[in-house]
Image (cartoon, helix red, strand yellow):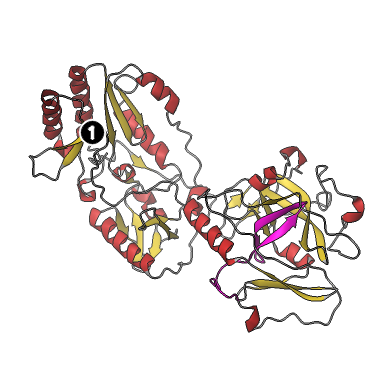
């Protein structure tokens, strides 16, 4: 990222940083004769997928200062990490202002120094302390980010015996990230820091000689896991799910006792009422999708998904990421399922191309997700409103009988617009494919689906039906009335070729 600053913006420190003037160098790092400032507290992390995970502090010992010296900075076998992946980024602890901030990325490829908003707030700073500027940061894949503002903070490395410090002009960004801050090449150069990514460490000269700072491979791995999880906008349960009866619920087979086509019905119904409900659901058995192949998609004239990509955005083609081991096996299996269901097709010479990201689920299996971040940033947000949950709950109070329904892989029931299909292209070791149906993870997928549901159930919403995206609730005052309302709902689903998930 490459921001630009005016002369007035450079080196301006916020009023909130209260430090003695003699302890803050005006430019460049310094160290001679100044005590290493104590940390107010340590900031471990500001975003976590797993809040129970314990984070260990990286053992970073080292200080930094530029000196005219003939001492060479070299890396040898003893600098290699004892364990960890040599492809990990270098993640360290840095003293920012008077806080020890963990999970700081040393990124020589960035021209900007980034401080994420959450850690900015944890420091007790406010937006009033920010210097506003019309600067836009440009990412490596072409995405544009508007900072909340800029703030100059003291950054230091070292300990009580020897240390170095430098004023750093941070761009404060509102985004979720596995990192708390990113130090770019401008700051790294000011400390005279030389990085060796194979050795996962950085070295620099001090008055005492060469000092080494080692990255924390455990925290680097954790940052990667968080980044992978962040690309998953929607959970995508493609695998078939068995019907597990809950308390007060029994399994009902729709085609006889030996049938595998099972739905859940309340156990509080008497035998006659259960028979009436079973007869009605059996009559509409084709409304349920028992396998992904049963979903044929709704009529394009009713709804299809358009991307509306900005005309000023150039297509982005990502280089294929390397996947190995069980991830490759999971990708191969998922591609086979998607092709068998007719959800994707092969593409040649795509203008847009992105990678897949494998995310491990709680059951130990892998979920294949597509990294649509670049495509999403090129699309304006669809402001179609989603229903308010509290309002829907209020409208349901007083109804005695309810049926809960969930659309089967709801998003995949809406076709992509023909002209936008190839913009969803993703690459794997088994080929290059695009989605024919609306995939999970697209920016405006929920808005498109909600708009369709509102149109399809226009006569029932707020009366005998509530719907939030692909979750539908049919409500009635009596069982007799409920059978009528449920039939009307199933008729509508059948008319528009929308399929339900029997497991829900």
Is 495 covered by the magenta stretch? no
- The x, y position of residue 115, in whole percent, is 68, 51
Give the answer, above or below, for where 217 lies relative to 396: below
Q: Is residue 333 left or right of residue 77?
A: left
Q: Is residue 256 left or right of residue 385?
A: left
Give the answer, above or below, for where 270 lies relative to 255: above
- Local packing at callout 1 (Cα closer than 10 Å; few below 14, some 14-19, many 20+) is some
Considering the numbered disc 1 on the image, is that residue within a helix, a strand or a loop?
strand
Q: Quadrant of residue 196?
A: bottom right
The residue depicted at 87 percent of the width and 59 percent of the height is: 35
Count the numbered circles shown. 1
Q: Does any portion of residue 3 appear in the rendered image?
A: no
Q: Is residue 74 left or right of residue 467?
A: right
Q: Quadrant of residue 16?
A: top right
Quadrant containing the C terminus is top left
Q: Where does the magenta region start and end?
A: 81-109
- The x, y position of residue 344, in whole percent, is 31, 55
- The x, y position of residue 60, in whole percent, is 69, 66
Give the answer, above or below, for where 411 lies relative to 347: above
Residue at image mark 1: 249
Q: Does any portion of residue 367 appear in the rendered image?
A: yes
The residue depicted at 25 percent of the width and 54 percent of the height is: 342
């Amino acid at each position: 990222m490459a921001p630009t600053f005016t002369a007035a913006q450079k080196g301006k420190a916020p009023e909130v940083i209260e430090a003695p003037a003699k302890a803050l160098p005006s430019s460049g790092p310094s160290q001679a004769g100044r005590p290493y400032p104590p940390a107010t507290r340590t900031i471990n992390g500001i975003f976590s997928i797993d809040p129970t995970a314990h984070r260990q502090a990286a053992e970073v010992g080292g200080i930094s200062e530029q000196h005219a010296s003939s001492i060479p900075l070299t890396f040898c076998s003893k600098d290699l990490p004892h364990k960890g992946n040599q492809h990990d980024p270098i993640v360290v602890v840095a003293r920012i202002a008077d806080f020890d901030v963990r999970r700081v990325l040393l990124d020589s490829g960035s021209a900007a120094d980034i401080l994420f908003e959450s850690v900015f707030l944890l420091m007790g700073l406010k937006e009033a302390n920010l210097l506003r500027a019309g600067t836009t940061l440009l990412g490596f894949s072409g995405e544009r980010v508007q900072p909340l503002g800029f703030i100059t903070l003291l950054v230091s490395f070292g300990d009580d015996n020897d240390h170095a410090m430098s004023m750093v002009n941070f761009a404060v960004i509102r985004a979720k990230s596995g990192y708390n801050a990113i130090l770019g090449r401008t700051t790294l150069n000011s400390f005279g820091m030389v990085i060796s990514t194979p050795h996962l460490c950085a070295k620099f000269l001090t008055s005492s000689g060469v000092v080494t700072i080692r990255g924390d491979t455990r925290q680097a791995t954790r940052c990667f896991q968080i980044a992978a999880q962040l690309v998953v906008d929607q959970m995508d349960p493609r695998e078939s799910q068995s019907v597990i009866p809950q308390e007060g619920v029994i399994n009902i087979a729709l085609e006889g006792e030996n049938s595998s086509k099972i739905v859940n019905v309340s156990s509080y119904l008497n035998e006659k009422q259960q028979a009436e409900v079973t007869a009605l659901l059996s009559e509409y058995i084709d409304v349920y999708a028992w396998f992904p192949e049963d979903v044929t998609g709704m009529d394009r004239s009713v709804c299809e998904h358009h991307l509306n990509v900005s005309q000023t955005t150039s297509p982005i083609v990502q280089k294929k990421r390397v996947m190995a081991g069980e991830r490759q096996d999971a990708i191969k299996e998922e591609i086979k399922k998607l092709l068998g269901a007719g959800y994707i097709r092969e593409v040649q010479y795509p203008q847009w191309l992105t990678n897949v990201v494998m995310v491990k689920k709680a059951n130990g299996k892998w979920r294949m997700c597509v990294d649509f971040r670049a495509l999403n940033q090129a699309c304006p947000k669809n402001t179609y409103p989603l229903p308010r949950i509290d309002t829907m709950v209020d409208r349901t109070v007083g109804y005695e009988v309810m049926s809960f329904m969930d659309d089967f892989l709801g998003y995949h029931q809406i076709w992509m617009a023909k002209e936008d299909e190839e913009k969803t292209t993703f690459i794997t070791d088994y080929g290059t494919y695009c989605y024919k149906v609306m995939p999970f993870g697209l920016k405006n997928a929920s808005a498109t689906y909600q708009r369709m549901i509102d149109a399809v159930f226009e006569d029932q919403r707020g009366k005998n039906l509530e719907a939030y995206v692909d979750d539908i609730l049919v409500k009635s005052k009596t069982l007799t009335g409920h059978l009528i309302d449920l039939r009307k709902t199933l008729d509508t689903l059948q008319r528009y070729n929308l399929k339900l998930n029997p497991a829900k």
